[in-house]
Image (spheres, rainbow, N blue to C red):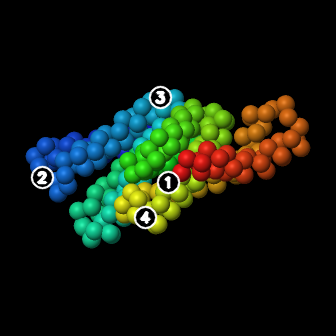
């Protein structure tokens, strides 16, 4: 039964993807053409990653949470836009993205390690997508660099590498500093437009989730990364990891913000 649930999610996602694509081709959707095709593609990705995860290796199973993270971020943006513009069609688009995310994440996770990886992969994907969106609104090279680090973290986390948690923490910390500067520029001079606080908000939520999740697992992470270290040395590493990531993020972002 557990193996069937991912396939059920995949079948539903595939059916919705086909229906949305056909409706978009017939110009029957209330949104501009790219929006309809994008959400259809997201449902298709949810279906594909559910199938490959069900029949493949653990790292393939975890990649579906990257699709879920992208869907959650996009759903948040459209919900914010719907509230700002008072448009019900955008609220419906937000709901569709949320459903796509639920279908991508649906099914079962094998164990506690998979559940931790799911949170970190989804949250890091939110960070990466949000920073790419912010890149179009100023300081593009810096935002893209942090987004690339978040994507690297997603790949390492999906493959179950302990180093992925450290890379994810570093990217999350840099993202928090970048979002703070982006919101500051928007608040002072309106740089980037009204979308900035919403997009920066999704990045900040994802980054905070990464840091909180990793912080709880640091003792086990450092046992894997430094098996020969003494207990005292590992305690120092555990205590210093998040502050070091925040300091490194500030050093990497603030001089260029």
Q: Nearer the viewer, mark 2 or mark 4?
A: 4
Q: Nearer the viewer, mark 3 or mark 2?
A: 2
Pointer 2 or 1: first along the chain: 2
Q: Nearer the viewer, mark 4 or mark 3?
A: 4
Q: Residue at x 85, y 31 (%)?
A: 228
How many residues crowd mark 3 within 10 Å: few (<14), some (14–19), many (20+)?
few
Pointer 4 or 3: first along the chain: 3
* Residue 175, label in figure: none
Q: Residue at x 58, y 33 (%)?
A: 156
Whole-percent x, y for residue 24 in the image: 16, 47
Q: Quadrant of the N terminus?
A: top left
The residue lying toward the viewer, choosing from 19 and 109, is: 19
Q: Which residue is mark 1?
A: 203
- The answer for how far apart the CA atoms under marks 4 and 3 are is 50 Å
Whole-percent x, y for residue 69 in the image: 45, 48
Q: Which residue is mark 2?
A: 28
The residue lying toward the viewer, choosing from 186 and 108, is: 186
Q: Is 128 on the left or on the right of 114, as rendered?
A: left
Q: Nearer the viewer, mark 2 or mark 1?
A: 1
Q: Which residue is mark 4?
A: 189
- The answer for how far apart the CA atoms under marks 3 and 2 are is 37 Å
Determine the secondary structure under disc 2.
loop
Q: Which residue is mark 3?
A: 56
Q: Residue at x 57, y 54 (%)?
A: 176
The residue lying toward the viewer, choosing from 138 and 195, is: 138
Q: Quadrant of residue 132?
A: top left
């Amino acid at each position: 039964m557990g193996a069937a649930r991912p396939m059920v999610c995949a079948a539903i996602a595939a059916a919705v993807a086909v229906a949305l694509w056909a409706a978009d081709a017939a110009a029957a959707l209330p949104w501009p053409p790219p929006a309809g095709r994008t959400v259809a593609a997201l449902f298709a990705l949810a279906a594909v990653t559910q199938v490959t995860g069900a029949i493949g290796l653990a790292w393939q199973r975890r990649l579906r949470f990257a699709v879920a993270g992208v869907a959650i971020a996009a759903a948040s943006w459209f919900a914010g836009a719907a509230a700002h513009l008072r448009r019900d069609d955008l609220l419906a688009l937000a709901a569709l993205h949320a459903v796509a995310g639920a279908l991508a994440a649906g099914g079962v996770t094998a164990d506690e390690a998979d559940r931790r990886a799911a949170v970190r992969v989804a949250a890091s994907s939110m960070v990466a997508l949000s920073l790419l969106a912010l890149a179009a609104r100023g300081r593009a090279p810096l935002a893209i660099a942090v987004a690339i680090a978040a994507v690297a973290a997603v790949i390492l986390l999906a493959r179950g590498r302990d180093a992925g948690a450290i890379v994810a923490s570093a990217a999350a910390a840099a993202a928090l500093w970048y979002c703070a500067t982006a919101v500051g520029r928007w608040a002072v001079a309106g740089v980037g437009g009204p979308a900035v606080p919403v997009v920066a908000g999704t990045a900040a939520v994802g980054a905070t989730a990464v840091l909180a999740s990793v912080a709880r697992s640091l003792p086990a992470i450092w046992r894997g990364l430094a098996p020969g270290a003494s207990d005292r040395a590992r305690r120092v590493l555990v205590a210093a990891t998040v502050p070091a990531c925040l300091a490194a993020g500030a050093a990497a972002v603030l001089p260029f913000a």
